[in-house]
Image (spheres, rainbow, N blue to C red):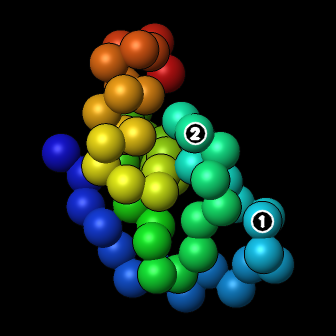
C-alpha cells in the first residue's frame, strides 16, 4: 500500500487536506497513495484504506 513520506510541500496551513477525513496535511504527516497515475494525499494509512475501500477503482 502507500507510504508515509517526508515532503517539502511549501503550503500555507490548511491548504492541503486529507481526502478521507479533511484533516490538514503538513510536511510531518503526509501519507500518499498513487492510483491510476494520480497521487492522493491522506493524514494516515487508515484514512487511505477507508477511502479506497469506499471508492474502489472508480478513482
Residue 8 seen in render: yes
Kindly identify the residue that appears in the image at 30 percent across and 67 percent down. 4
Image-based side of 10 in relation to 15, left or right: left
x then y, percent, for residue 26? 59, 75
Q: Is residue 9 left or right of residue 31?
A: right
For residue 32, which numbered disc appears in the image? Answer: none
Q: Residues within 10 Å of mark 2 (few under 14, many from 20)?
A: some
* Residue 14: mark in rendering: 1
Give the SS element for disc 2. loop
Residue 32, position as x, y percentages in the image: 39, 56
Percent x, y of residue 12 = 81, 78
The residue located at (55%, 87%) in the rendering is 8
Q: Residue at x 65, y 44 (%)?
A: 22
Q: Which residue is mark 2?
A: 21
Circle 1 crowding by C-alpha within 10 Å: few under 14, some 14–19, many from 20: few
Which one is nearer the viewer's eye here, 56 or 24? 24
Say which residue appears at 36% left-offset and 28% top-offset: 50
* Quadrant placement of the N terminus: top left
Judged left or right of residue 29, residue 5 is: left
Relative to 54, say whether 19 is above or below: below
Tell me residue 47's x, y (percent): 40, 40
Q: How far separated are the C-alphas under marks 1 and 2?
A: 13 Å
Query: Would you place residue 20 above or below residue 17 in this image?
Result: above
Q: Quick one: which residue is furthest to the left in this view?
A: 1
Element marked by disc 1: loop
Amino acid at each position: 500500500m502507500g507510504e508515509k513520506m517526508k515532503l517539502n510541500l511549501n503550503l500555507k496551513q490548511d491548504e492541503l487536506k486529507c481526502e478521507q477525513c479533511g484533516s490538514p496535511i503538513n510536511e510531518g504527516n503526509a501519507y500518499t497513495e498513487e492510483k491510476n497515475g494520480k497521487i492522493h494525499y491522506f493524514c494516515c494509512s487508515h484514512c487511505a484504506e477507508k477511502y479506497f475501500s469506499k471508492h474502489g477503482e472508480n478513482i
